Amino acid sequence: MGKEESPQITRRTTRSSSSTPILKNGEETTKTSEPHPLTINDLVFGGEPIKLDELLSSFPGRRIQILELMRLLGPLNSPMLPLLLYGGTSTGKTSIILQIFRHLNRPFVYSSCLTCYSPRILFESIMNQLLLHRKNADSGYASAKRCERPSDFVVFLREALTNVLNTLKGNSGKSSSRKLAGQANGRMIYLIFDNLELVREWDKSSSILPFLFELYDILNMPEVGLIFISKVSPDAYYSDRGYVEPIPILFPDYTEDGLRQIFMRNQANPKLYSSFLDVVLRTFSRITRRVDELSTAFSPLFKKYCEPLSDPGLVPNEDTKRKLFSHLQPHLAPALNEIFKVQSQPSPEVEAKQEKARRKSNANKLGGREAFDEIDFHMSTSAKYLIISAFLASRNPATLDASLFDSTGGSDNRKRKRKSSEKSMEQKETAEQELLMKGPGTFPLERLLAIFQCLTSVVESSLGEDQQINEGLGAGNGDSGLMSDVLLQLSSLCNANFISKGGSCPLEGSTRYRATISEDLTLKVARSLKFPLSKYLYRG
Amino acid sequence: MKGRENPAEDALILLRSRICNPNFVFTPFSDSPDSNYSKLKFIISSSVTEACNNSILLLGPRGSGKTAVLELVIRDLLAEHADMISVIRLNGILHSDDNCAVKEIARQLCVEHQLLFSKMASFDDNSQFMIAMLRECGLAHKTIIFVLDEFDFFTQGKQRLLYSLLDAMQSVMSQAVVIGVSCRLDADQLLEKRVRSRFSHRKVLFLPPSKEDLQRLLEHILSLPVDTSPPNDYAVEFNMKLHQILADERFKEIINTLLNSDSTVKHLLRFLFYAVCHMDLESGFLSLDNFRTAMSSIQRQPKMEYLQDCSILELYILVCMKRLEVKEQNSYNFNSVMKAEYKGIHDAYQTSDYYARNVCLRAFEHLVQRELICFMDNRGNNQSIEFRAVKLLISSHELYQGLKSYRSCPAILRKLVDQ
């Protein structure tokens, strides 16, 4: 079974690693520890140049987009209006444009609004690349120029671009007949802005976004090309001030044929994989058509598919295919429901420990790593009880606490066993509807601690000796003297987003908390403690 | 082939550089006496020669050529009266902050007159420097032209810059022309009372080009030059074919449709750029098909495109939300969509597409990412995603069209939307 290579995940080489050892004028590669200073030729993609056929074949299903981009970029030294590449996740926008620049061998400056998460970082990153500045320890990893405002950026950018363009003109004038490998083509430079949709979330987005779109007109330099890459469509950028729209190019999601072509790449046994895809591709693409999600779902399934085969290089005939299909089929339905779950890959030591634990407790019905009913991370017992208390505090109205958590620790169902009239059934329905809509309620800290104490005092008295047997569980929950421990647990649960902390309002008094943990997870936690959660839950 | 490709490629590069060059594009508009170019040139040159102050507003939709025509005028004036004019350019997007603007003015003045500019100068220093320069230039009979792009940005806040500039023009012995460029047609209403009283209410409106102007523009941009010393057969043939296309009724229809949505010159230029890029380099001539392709690329429907990209589960969720809307439920969230509709559809029709809750939640998140649905509140009050109220961002018509053109759409969905 070959290694699955998703073509979207091309390694974006860093500037230092992309510089080729074939320097111009036949300089020797210096073997010093210091990386050599950057030259203008480091602004190209570097590495082996590729031909158009290679480019087209490495991106199946993207022929139209690549050819269109090549047309819009145009022949060498032709000016260009700004472009906007848009499409969903992992449709190949960034990798295709970078590979196109590798093929064309033209210099470009790439910056992503994901890594450059504020205007200052964005501007300085572009300036560093244009000024051929590498951050090093001597200068304390400082940028070449400090640049915070768009006005400063435009001034510096113009200067830097003029310098770069002059160097390029000089280079292209010198050796016009034979270009050395690794040398940049042409006299134009291109600026690529990736993840543009994130700029809308920035603080200064109302001025930065129009600035980026107007940048082409403000600069008024025909030797500069601008390319924007965005996940959302162009109509998300419309503003009431109007803006000059760049030329849009759509990258649609892959069709089923395209997906098949992508998954068939780099497979060690194409016929076997093709029969596997016949089984799974259609059903799984009903849920999602994203390449990254499908590939994570397919890899464990393929392992399972190949299990009965003794020879992984076997070309399957009809019988084998049917056998393999029937082996896989019972696993398909649960796999569909777990399609977005990325299985963690435990190390061999953890697996051995799991085996030991499984042999001891014979409660585990489902084998393998697919233990849907168990939580797969470790929590101390007090944290588990805290979670349960928080969940109950959020779901139950406060008035019920007294009856639920009386001295016996059990809920008293006798009072509620009345024949429910029609009106109260309706009320129950609307209350349920409201519960669905409103979400979990808030509770103050004191209520949480009260419920926690109540639960743990009951449990403590009933469990007694059994706790010592279960090794590997955290420290015992213990007596009311350990209140500070509980408060520490509470803050770590807040950090883990199981409980969220509301702002403190001076009118309401202390801060209120809300349990944002899902019901499934709470049930798993309760089950691991053998806690009867449903008895305590108020169901209308 | 190689001999043939080169003239076509050269022609392509020439056409592209023309389209990306606003100076070239707007030159034909400078001929007639009642064009905006002539009006503008007259106003500015008269205030230069008569040594008086003036202020103008250039108004018009974005992309109608205001800055381009202004730059043409300035270029011609600089050619005529070289040392009687100096130009300071500010842009509202960059310099709307008063400190920033005055610093930029001081910097440009320093560059122009070869003075040293200190970055440490304060706002007061810079504004005093500006007033002093105005006085000096006035005494030397030199006009300073201030170009304020995106003028409406300067009217935000206290309008300190505008006031000090216009006030200096009135009180100090200066010669200055302030030209504001804005795409808001009511830009002068945004001025404060004291600023507006110092502003002359001259406005030059930039209207969409007329039919004759349009024809002239197309010919001007797309025709290759034929007056080269060895007569260029290729260029002559190119122009002939071009004229045939321009006279074609179908081409006129395409242009009409294009300008119906947006009649600015910039929009037309984008269209021409796209068409020219698709010129067939083998034959070396433009064809009507190029323009048709360009038209279809401009007439995009992004939401429909995204609907085609959805998976079948995501379509189910959209249809459920649409049904909830039809039932006039004002606010609903993921939970109610799941419980009320999704389960209901599965129970009623026994579909095979009934998936677990976490899978549906992830598909729901994909829809939010694609901006086909959105949350109604901002930043959610710390609520998790299942409880936040959502709404659809597509209309029922779009959903219906999307389902109709979706390949392999389950018949159930189409039926449900029909009801």
Image (cartoon, helix red, strand yellow):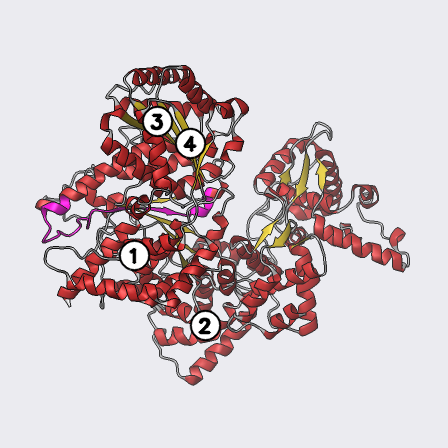
How far apart are the alpha carbons under marks 2 and 3?
85 Å
- Name the residue tied to disc 3: B47
- The one nearer the camera, B265 or B315, is B265
Say if A302 sits above or below A430 in the image: below
Same chain under badges 4 and 2? The reply is no
Q: Please identify, in this view, whether the residue under mark 1 or under mark 2 is nearer the observer.
A: 1
Chain letter behind tag 2: A
Q: Earlier in the sequence, mark 1 or mark 4?
A: 4
Q: Earlier in the sequence, mark 1 or mark 3?
A: 3
Q: Are marks 1 and 2 in contact (CB under 8 Å)?
A: no
User: Where residue A178 appears, x then y in whole percent?
Assistant: 10, 53
User: Where residue A84 appears, x then y in whole percent?
Assistant: 39, 52
How far apart are the alpha carbons under marks 4 and 3?
11 Å
Q: Which mark is residue B219?
A: 1
Which quadrant would the N terminus of chain A be assigned to in this image?
bottom left
Extent of the magenta region: A171-199
Q: Amino acid at mark 1?
A: Glu
Q: Earlier in the sequence, mark 4 or mark 3?
A: 3
- The one nearer the camera, A321 or B173, is B173
Judged left or right of residue B398, residue B270 is: left
- Name the residue tied to disc 4: B56
User: Where residue A113 appears, x then y in whole percent?
Assistant: 41, 43
